[in-house]
Image (cartoon, rainbow, N blue to C red):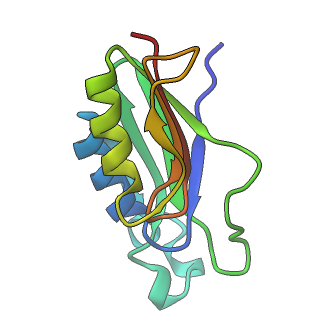
Amino acid sequence: MDISPYLNFKGECAEAFQFYAETFGGQITFMQTHGDSPMKDSVPPDWQDKIMHATLKVGDKIVMGSDAPPERYTAPRGFFVSVALPSATDGERIFNALTEGGTVELPFQKTFWAAGFGMGSDRFGIPWMVNCES
């Protein structure tokens, strides 16, 4: 069994996944717009370029996502996407990239359980926790 986060966006999935690929050093392995899908005739013209499904591979982990139609989109709440990194230096770099243009809930800092930990949301509204044990 594998459990992977599936992130919904309000129209900026392509931009977010490009940003995540750069930030995490991952690779987008699949990205399809509504207009490129067999369902293109059932999607309004202004949604033809929105993402129906995207997959990002980071190491051996997968993150998936799509653009949610306006009537179905709700802002994320009640969860964080957790990222564990091997060093506080890497953690701080990733945390700063993720929260640039977003919000910082808990600044990245040394804690009693980690060499570095921070919580915040990116500019797309996705909440992140970055943890570094050493």
Q: Nearer the viewer, residue 30 or 79?
A: 79
Q: Nearer the viewer, residue 67 or 33?
A: 67
Residue 107 in the image: x percent, y percent? 48, 44
Residue drawn 42% across the image and 42% down it:
55
In which quadrant of the rendered image does the C terminus lie?
Answer: top left
Q: Is residue 126 above or below residue 91?
A: below
Residue drawn 59% across the image and 44% down it:
6
On screen, residue 66 versus residue 59, left or right, reads right
Q: Is residue 26 visible?
A: no
Residue drawn 63% across the image and 75% down it:
69
Q: Residue furthest bottom?
A: 45
Residue drawn 47% across the image and 69% down it:
34
User: Residue 29 lies in what quarter of the image?
Assistant: top left
User: Residue 108 lies in what quarter of the image?
Assistant: top left
Q: Is residue 3 above or below residue 75?
A: above
Q: Which of 106 and 85 is in front in this view?
A: 106
Q: In this view, does 10 lie above or below 119?
A: below
